[in-house]
Structures are given as C-alpha cells and as structure tokens.
Amino acid sequence: MRKSKALLFEMSRPGRRGYSLPSNDVPEKSLDELLPRKAQRSEPLELPELSEVGVVRHYTELSTRNFGVDTGFYPLGSCTMKYNPKINEEVAVLPGFAFMHPCQPEETTQGALELLYNFEQGLKELTAMDRFTMQPAAGAHGELTGLMVIQAYHRSRGDHNRNKVLIPLSAHGTNPATVSMAGYEVVQIPCDDRGLVDLDALKEAVDETTAALMLTNPSTLGLFEEEIIPMAKAVHEVGGLLYYDGANLNAIMGYTRPGDMGFDVVHLNIHKTLSTPHGGGGPGSGPVGVKERLIPFLPVPLVSKEEDRFYLDYDVPETIGKMHSFYGNFGVAIKAYTYMRMMGAEGLKEASTDAVINANYLMSLLKKTYYVPYDRICKHEFIVSAKPEKKKGAGAGDIAKALLDRNFHPPTVYFPLIVDEALMIEPNDTEAKETLDAFAATMEQIAKDIDEDAEKVAHGPYNTVVGRLDEVRAVRNPVLIWQKDKE
Amino acid sequence: MGYNIIDGVKYTKKHEWARQEGNEAVVGLSDYAQDKLGEIVFVELPDVGTEVEAGKGSAVIESVKAVADLYAPADGTITEVNEALLDQPEVINSDPYGEGWVYKMELKNESQMDELMDKPAYEKFVVEEDEK
Amino acid sequence: MGGKHYLPLTDEDRREMLAEIGVSSVEDLFSDIPREVRLQRELELPSPLSEYEAFKHLNELASKNKHFNNCVSFMGAGVYDHFIPAVIKHITGRSEFYTSYTPYQPEISQGVLQAIFEYQTMICQLTGMEVANASMYDGGTAVAEGAVMGCGATRRSKVLVSRSVSPLYRAVLDNYFNSRGLEVEEIPIKDGYTDRSELENKMGDDIATVILQQPNFFGLVEDMEGIADMVHGHKAVLLVSADPLSLPLLQAPSEYGADIVVGEGQGLGVPASFGGPLLGIMAAKSKFVRQMPGRIAGETVDSEGNRGYVLTLQTREQHIRREKAPSNICSNEALVALGAAVYMAAMGPQGMREVAEQCLQKAAYARESITALKGYDDVYAGSTFKEFTVTVPGDPAELNKKLLEKNILGGVDLAPFYPELKNAMLFAVTEKRTKEEIDTLVRELEGWK
Ligand SMILES: Cc1ncc(COP(=O)(O)O)c(C=O)c1O
C-alpha cells in the first residue's frame, strides 16, 4: 500500500497535448513585428506535456491520497471543519456569479451587489456590528484590516501614542504576527489557573499607549471569557478598542454577539463558522465588521443601497484604502450567504448548540482516559494534554499519527502553546453522536497501545500511503521544486 | 530524565551556558535546551562586534517546529562566532558544550558571571522546570 | 426546515449526551456567558430556505448579472476572460481536495502537498525563479508582501514603485506600508513607461525594493535591460509583477535579473468571480526563501525511503515565529492554485504559448483596427501584449453603456486611476475573442458619436 506517486514532470512526453484551443482567425503578424526581440523569451518554456486523460488520472490519484471532511471526522481544533453543503458549490459556479468581471458597469452587477448587501445585513445581525467590508480574503487578512482601521481611528483623533496591542498568551499565531505587521508592539497577557485571561494582569497592562486588545471569545482553549465585561471596560477606559477574532464564533451564534460583549471590530472566518470549504488551505474569506464610529475608516469600496439600486460606494471619508485588488473573495461569500439563508436564525443557533453539546460530550468521554487541563464546561472545543502519555514515550504528535491509521483526522496538535503536548479537539455541529463515540473509543485504544508499546506508537503511522515523513531532512536540505537534472 | 550538565561552565535560566576564559566567555546552548528544541536545523549568528545585553536575544536557533532566541548571559561584545554551525547546526545537538558553541564575547562586567548558576544549582533548576 | 439537515443530532441524542456530560439542560452549557451579554431575543434573519428555494433565490440573483457567457468581454486590468478548460472544475470539485484543511498532517495530505509542490515547480518554470510559495491572496497583496520581503532581506524601509504598476496593487501596497511605518515612493511614468532617469535619480542605498510590472498596467512591454544591474548596484531587490500568461512569449523575469516575481494568476484557468477568489503568485531566487511569506511544500522521504511531501521551512510562519514572522498569512488560495496547476499541466508548454500568441495577435489586430478609426488614438505608442489604451471621443461610461446594448463589456475607464487621462480606456483582448467579435466592437465604436 505504501508508494510514492510519480510527478507530472516524470510522466511528460514531448508532443503530448491536453488542450484544445480555437485557431487564430485574425491576420497574423510576425512575432518580431509585435514584440521587441530582446523582450522575447530566449529559452523555451519547460512545462510538463500530458494528455487530458493523463492529467485527470494524475489528479484523481492525488485526491485519493488526501483526507477531507467528506472522507471522515475532522476534529481539527480552531478550524471548525464542519460539513460543506453541496448546494453552496452549485450556486457559486452559476455563470452569473463565476464569470463576472469586477469592473463591469453597475447595472450589470445588481444581483452580485444585492447578495453582498444582504449578506452584510445578516453578518451585522449575527455580530451586532454596524457595517462590514468583505475585502479581507481570510481571517488573518481581516485581522490586519481591523488593526489598520483601529490605527486610522486613533490617528484621526491625533492620538499618536498608542503603539501597543494586547493579546492573551493563548492567542493564535496570526494575532501577534498581525500586530507586528500593523506596526504595533505586542504585549502578552497571561492566563490564570482557569485558563481565562488574567483580569488583574490585563488591568495592569492597559494604559494610554494601548491601541487595542485582540481577543477570541471563546478562547483558543475553548473557554468563554466570563469576565469580558470588566475586560472591555478596562480597555475602553484608557481609550483602547476591542478586536474580536471570530475564528471561534461557531460556539455562540444566537447566544451572544461580539458587539454586545463590547467589541468594536470583528473579523469572521466564514470558511469556518459559515460552512464554506477550506480548499486544502484556502480560499477563505474574513469579512470585518465595525461599530458606527469606525465606519469612516473602512476600506473602499463598501456596498451601499439607494432606493432599489445597489452600488459600490467609494464615499468613505477617512478610508484606510484598499486591502485587496477588488472586493475580496466574492465566490466564498456566495456560499456563506447560501448557508446563512438556509439555516436562518434558528438553524444557526442550533448549530452552535450542537457544536457545544458535541464538544462537552466528547470531553466527558475522553477525560476518562486523558488529562484535561481545564476541566470545566467548554464551548465548541477543548484541550487534552498528552503530557502523561509523552512521559510513557508517545506524545501528542504520536497520538495524531495513530489516529491517521484509524481513519480519523487528528485534532490540532501543539497548540495553544501554553499547554504542553496539547491536543485541541473541535468536533463541531455536523457530527453524529456515533462518530464521537467511535472517536473516543479509538482514543482509548490508543492510550492502551501507548501503555503496551509506546515505542510502536511513536513510530506510526503504519496504514497511510507514506510513512512518517522526515521533516528535518526537508528543512536541512530543502527541495522546493522538481528539477530535471536532479533526477 | 538524564541531561548532561557539566562542570566548569555557568548556566542561565534560559538554558544558555557560558564558560569564562579571561575576560571572554564562550556561549552555547545547554544539553537540556537542545533536547527540548529537538533537531536543530538553522542558526542565525550575530555579527562580530555586536554589543549584546544580558538577557536579550543575541542569536536565533531553529528546529523544525520551534524558534528559540539565544539570550546573552552577560553584557558585552561579540568577538567570534562559530561559523561551522551555519552548515552543520546539528552539532549543537550532538556536542552542545564542545563543537556546538555559538559565539565568544568580551565581558563588559565579569562579575555578571557570578550571578549565573553553577552545576548543582542548574541541576536543581532543570528538575523544577521539567516538573512544571 | 431549511438547513437543519446538516445537523445530525436527534433530540434523543441530545438528551443522552447531556446526561453523559452531567448537566440537565442545554442552558447549563451556556451558563458561563454572563447574562448582561446574552442575546435576550432570537436573531432576526430571513426565514430559512429549503435547498431548492435557496437554489431558486441564488439563481435569481445570478440571473440579474451580465457575465462572460452572455456578453463579449474586453475588460482587463488584472482580471480577464481567458479560456478555462473543463477539466479544472472536475479536479478542484473532488471533495477530498476541497473539503480538506491546510495539510498539517502530511501522511494523509499527500494529494494537496504534491499538487502544491508541482504548482511551485511550474510557477518557477514560467518565471525562471528558484522557489515559489503555495499562493498569496491576490496580485495586490503579493506585490505588497513581496515589497516587504525586500525590506526584510535588505533591512531597509523604503521602496520605489513605478506608476505603471497597477493602481489597484499600488493602493494595497500603500496601505500595507503606511500602517507598518514603511515608505513608498512613486517613480513617474514617461509615455506610459517607467521613467528610467527618474528611477535612477531616486535610486539610492536606502532603497529596499524596486517594483515594476511586466507588461505594465497599460499593457506596454517595459524595457527591462540594465535595470537589475542598477538596482543590484545599490544592493536593492528587483521585484516584478508579471502576467503569467505573457511569460511563454516574454523573457522570463530571471533573464533580466528579477529577484522576486509576483503576479495575479487569475488567467491560469481561474473564474473571474467578480474579482475573487484570485491567485497571488509569489516566487523568488532561493536566497530570499527565509523572507518569503506563506506555505511552502518541500520534498522529503518517509521512514522507508518513499518520496513524500511536507510543509517545510515553517519557522518563517506566524504559527511558530508569531510577532517576528515576516507575514501573518495563514489560509491562502490553495484550491485556486490547484486549479492553476491543473491548467498549466493541461495546457502544457505549447498550449500556453498558443494562448499567449493568440492574445498578442488578437490584441494587436484590435488595437490596429480601433486606432484606425477617427477619434480613437493610442494613448501610448509601443509594443503591447494583450491590453492597450486608447482615447475615445467621449465619456467612457457612456460608450460602455452603448456597447452593453450589443452585449459587449467594453474597456476599463482609466480616469479614476490616472486623473490626467481623460476619455481614455484600457481594452483587453484574450485568445477567446474571435475576429468577428473584434470587428463588431470596432463597428460599434465607429458608429458612436
Ligand atoms: C483563532 C484563529 N485566529 C485566526 C486564524 C487565521 O485565519 P485564516 O487562516 O483564515 O487567516 C485562525 C485560523 O486558523 C484561528 O484559528
């Protein structure tokens, strides 16, 4: 069963073709007449040459070497790998959406603008924000947009001394990276024994140099920050703003809203909460919503409505400018909008309810075998620490590999960083109880296997198309492209 | 776990070691630190002549999944760096106190070395760290 | 019922599960949310639609839009109506690909990882670079992050960007740099080209990156000779934003000494989708790899010596380097890159060359025919690839309105981007356009005014 797969380049045969183009029907000129000689490519292009069926078989085989939500349970914490409804895929490729040029005259784009407008109304209600931009192409891009808006707001008030952004130690890596990218300094706030942001430390840290607090609630530990009201107050009192990382919104839809918690800016990862597929790494979409006072700083264009007409609105007085060449990942927004329309208010709330039931249920099964460092009601995800197993010889990463052998996608491992040997488990709303039972039983079996032969577990996986890959070699001796003469 | 903690060098709380030679110190990563980092794949060395400050980042050591700053054990100036590490960073894993040294520095204030831990103190410190 | 069928728990399941958890009601699971912030009502959203109703609604919205299948498009400016082979949709539609996350667990992600590795290779074959990443969000963000790479590599904080680089990309660049406290200075244009003497004047040892576009925003083929030497003389980095579909004909950027190549990959079989998702291409010489943002796949072997692929050099990235990472990018445009890889594999070297040649020939024919008309002139003289600029005898918006009556999506008005260019339009002609379609456009233009 173990075998590597030939690369496109190794299957190439000179003269083989996988395309069919119309012929050129305009009077032809010589190349030299149209392009200066010295601007022309001197070496012929090296690309693989395959037949159409060759291409299809190659990628079909590659697809069989890949695991998706449609393959099986995918409890990858923080990523909300819920089922991706098929209707979303169908509507997004309708020619009236998929083959639109972004510069088309407004009267030819009314359907697209109406969709974006209505989607925005839904997001506003879901989050208690007053306006959204759809430009950010992913969550991290949304974070950057949000911090830029915050920065523009402070600057507009002549408030130039705010150079720090506070983030909890448990924050996702994109948060501190974004803070630096926006030219701010990171101030890390520790967590207390309960796993919640240490309120006293936060109060200690805020001052008139605080631009913002970036927070995800529930946190990356899957815990709701119960002290969100005093936290928000502490930040607002010194003139700072609150930024909500919406990666974990799947836990609270219909129960509470970032705007009601005191947040001023949010981004949503609609490729998580709103069911759009993650595509093996993207495209995602990270709409950013803001409260009234920050609207003047949003990127242009916004989508506005006047009577029955929808239009791209460039009249945003103090706009930060543009974040994306055009209007963001429209194709992803279509899918999320469709999901929202099908779920409705009740359905979205029920999704959050089931996500939270599933997480708590799975936690209560797993804590019979594993160490759960924050043993309290969780939201959509929870953390197991494999520190005891590590001492026996097989840690979080090895447990992940053992799961691969049993046809489960593993949880997120080694994150959040504040928990040793972390396994971050997010079962989400679209999984059945039987699936969770089977997963828990498998995890129990793996714990037994570690007791019996940790060494064996530490060398898995055994049933996958390739064995454990040598990541050290990949870094020490980087081979990042295929090269002809190297073979 | 058995870490190799040697005599004749001083240790920091961030797991660097420093061996004083006259008014210079040779600096590297302790066996404990290299074990925690795992296989080291990349080292970013300071330029000779760089002024370093005790407790501040002075070199960067990377494994596949982690990046660690090497903090200067004391104030001073870099006088020599171990360029062999650029090609063979894994030497830090195999010989952390010998061939795996990272840089030499001129000490600004030799008494700062007294503040670092000796072998027994560091042994105790490591046991505590491991229990956390 | 709407979309509740996506939620498999039955009432019976929920009861059993709550019992196992040891709580008496769902409410107990949400008791950690303070009352004051609890939503005391239900969300107000339109009532749920069944699957068929949703389809009908979306189909209605879609049918209000014009598009490439019911119009003939001459629009460009970074997004084009290129031919998309049917195979692409079928490959990217395989759900083992599209329902997977970023390939963190390589042993069960060999499909995506190998596809990325092959994509990186083909991007390097096109550009002549030595490394490429798995994608950026789009052409604009690729320019901005490429410029930052140059700052990281040179430890300098100022870049020069030609005014002939897409104004859409420059807007993103300005925004990224402004917030970070880095500086952008514009190199003026002369007759539509980067003004060489202005570039030389502004060049200095404080410049990190020089940013050019090939072909430039006006479709003109810039003269790249000698630029890299001048830039490298100041130990700065040359970044070029290139149209990948021009590269089968034009010099690979490596040939004129580019260090970093970025670009918009939408032409590589990606649906225009009203401007997104797009595909940010990013490639470079290998010495810049440690400054490169984003995912990179690399080859390695497994425990038995089988070849396999992993995400590699990850210490560059946000999840490890956190605030010291050169970029915050996490999710990218992986599935779009997969589609682009399928495109390149299916088209091969001849197919891509044919596409490029047809763009060149058809655009040249259109340009010659339009500028032969009274009232229509070249804005700028010089060789162009698939786009060109012309002045038109009146308001471009009105002209487009008239063209729309014939189901033609006309050119892009340049005035919003270059206020000095009044009544000027940018037309794009791809391999999909026929002589007849071009002749129709020309007839309509002739009959206007
Ligand atoms: C908590 C959190 N914040 C931010 C992000 C970044 O989102 P994206 O990958 O869409 O950029 C993620 C995604 O993994 C996340 O889990």
Image (cartoon, rainbow, N blue to C red):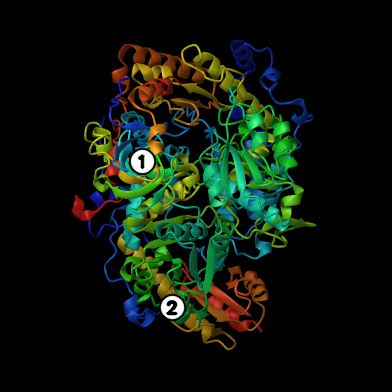
Residue C154 on image: x %, y %:
41, 60
Residue type marked 2: Glu
User: Disc 2 is attached to a residue of which chain?
Assistant: C
Front residue of this view, candidates C415 and A377: A377
Picture mark count: 2
Residue type marked 1: Glu
What residue is at 42 percent from the left and 31 percent from the top? B13
Mark 2, residues whose alpha carbon is within 10 Å: few (<14), some, or many (≥20)? few
Residue at disc 2, CB closer than 8 Å to ligand 1: no
Residue C317 on image: x %, y %:
44, 44
Label placed on residue B44: none
The residues bearing labels 1 and 2 have C-alpha atoms spaced at a distance of 40 Å
Kind of element beneath mark 2: helix
Residue A280 on image: x %, y %:
44, 41
Please give the residue where the numbered disc 1 appears in the rendered image. Answer: B62
What residue is at 29 percent from the left and 49 percent from the top? B80
Front residue of this view, candidates A190 and C306: A190
